[in-house]
Amino acid sequence: MKNGVLFGIGAYFLWGLLPIYWKFIHNVPALEIISHRMIWSFIFVVGVIAFSGGWAEFRVSLRGKKDILPFLFTSLLLTGNWLIYVWAVNAGFIVETSLGYFINPLVNVLLGVLFLREKLRPWQWVSVGLAFLGVAYLSWQYGSLPWIALSLAFSFAFYGLIKKKAALSSTQGFATETGIMFFPALAYLLFLEFTGKGAFGHQSLRVTALLILAGVATGLPLLLFGKAARMIPLSMMGFLQYLAPTMQLFIGVFLYHEPFPLDRLIGFGLIWIALLIYSLEGIVSHQKARSATPEMNREMHLPGWLRVKK
């Protein structure tokens, strides 16, 4: 379990550092960055699958058209999410991107209610309501909806909703998504090259290297996350996931000096309280369920006439 925690911390720590990575290549347009990210991520993850001996299984999984169909939608959602995120980071909206990933877990809950008919417990409704108040307050202060945060939160939530029903593993699914976008991304980069607008190989060596390494920067935390998810409880992963947006918030405020006045702190504070309530309620409910399970199991082994009638 200790290794699982370290893998989880490593994944979210690397995700938390991504704003700095994209800032290093802020002179490159966001769409060009995303195109490189798709291409090199695909090459990286396919290399990992082949090296781990999973290539034959991956090829077999690609033959099922029904298994691939959901990834047509997730690839578009992932592209949109990445594009908004990279553009927002390099345009000076790191704080608002962090808000999107703070909101995301509660948007997941909302989609679960709407599409999976999941039922919320009373304190979960309280947390969702507080998050709504926080977004409403920030919208009032901004004078408009925080569209960057909401776009990131909802696109990633729908991405997760569709992936929940997908048949492929996380690594195979990611390879499929980036593979679907590989040729459109390559076509766009070739267009930039032929029109003399491409950055790859035409700016500094550092920029070219960082564009290539975007695949590793994307794929490595994903692999660490996959290992952690199999080794530690979901409740612990739920706590660790707040590491990345917290780091992004601090990076935006303290490293790149983005404004974070009292009004914004109030809105964020409501959302943080909502997340705290939701997390603590989930832990308490999980512990109650675990403590009740042994009693239920013992009862099931009793003769029918000795079982408690409820």
Image: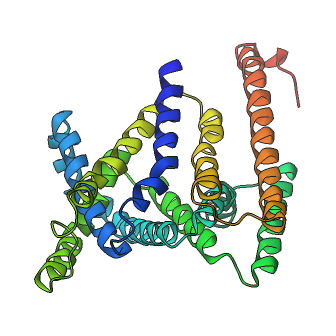
Residue drawn at point x = 83 percent, y = 68 percent: 263
x%, y% of residue 213?
27, 51
> Total number of numbered labels?
0
The front one of 151 and 205 is: 205
Residue drawn at point x = 46 percent, y = 30 percent: 7
Q: Is residue 193 left or right of residue 281?
A: left
Q: In this view, does 289 lie to the left or right of 160?
A: right
The front one of 41 and 210 is: 210
Q: Is residue 175 left or right of residue 262?
A: left
Q: Does residue 206 show up?
A: yes
Q: Does residue 169 show up?
A: no
Residue drawn at point x = 86 percent, y = 49 percent: 123
Location of residue 267 by image quarter: bottom right
Q: In this view, does 104 lie to the left or right of 291?
A: left
Query: Where the C terminus falls, by quadrant?
Result: top right
In the rendered image, the vertical position of residue 48 relative to residue 129, given as above or below: above
In the rendered image, the vertical position of residue 121 relative to residue 156, given as above or below: above
In the rendered image, the vertical position of residue 2 relative to residue 58, given as above or below: above
x%, y% of residue 147?
62, 77
Location of residue 280 by image quarter: top right
- Type of colouring: rainbow
Residue drawn at point x = 80 percent, y = 60 percent: 265
In the rendered image, the vertical position of residue 70 relative to residue 173, given as above or below: below
Location of residue 289 by image quarter: top right
x%, y% of residue 98?
61, 59
x%, y% of residue 159?
48, 62
